[in-house]
Amino acid sequence: MKMNEELTVFLSKLDGRTLFQVLVGPAGVHYNFASGTALSAKRRELSVLSNTPIHITSKLKKVMFACGPYPAYASQDELAAILITRQVAGAAFDPEKNALRVVLDEEILLSLLPRLDERGKETVWSVHSHLQEDTATGNLGFLVGPSFIKRIKQGKS
């Protein structure tokens, strides 16, 4: 299976999960997803970490939020108000742009698009699994940049 196909399979695991936590930190924005008992325990099953520009639009193509790559800490409340408790209807990878696009509740589109900043530094997003079956096999996630996709390998402890 090619890397893009593996990433597509990995992203399909987001389907049906609820975005229950958004955290703005020094590394970018963490989007934490869970379902079932993990959700009721507020235990993340899958996470997306992004230092890319954030673009959130409604089904009517109205821009609800746009900034980045590093939003102010004060943006956490605004992002949470738009995104929290929404369920993933679909998550897709655009290989031409290395972009992640997540549809929430069939009405909100969260787009994360890597680019080079003014200093030539890459912006990236990565999706990480906290699911037992993935962590047992070392499938922790993928790091995506403007010109590469790299599997994140599990460190030996």
Image: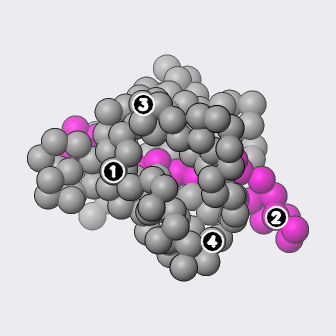
In the rendering, at what x and y percent does residue 31 appear? 44, 56
Mark 1 highlights which residue?
85
Instruction: Give amino acid for label 2.
Output: Asp
Mark 2 highlights which residue?
117
Residues under labels 2 and 4: Cα distance?
A: 14 Å
Q: In this view, which residue lies farthest toward the top?
A: 1
| Circles 1 and 3 in contact, beta carbons < 8 Å | no
Query: Which label was assigned to residue 89?
Result: 3
Residues under labels 2 and 3: Cα distance?
A: 31 Å
Instruction: Give amino acid for label 4.
Output: Pro
Q: Main secondary structure of the magenta part?
A: loop
Query: Which label was assigned to residue 71?
Result: 4
Instruction: Using residue 39 as the reference point, say whether residue 69 is left or right of it.
Output: right
| Residue at the (82%, 64%) spot, across then down | 117
Looking at the image, is mark 4 or mark 1 nearer the viewer? 1
Looking at the image, is mark 2 or mark 4 nearer the viewer? 4
Earlier along the polypeptide chain: callout 4 or callout 1? 4
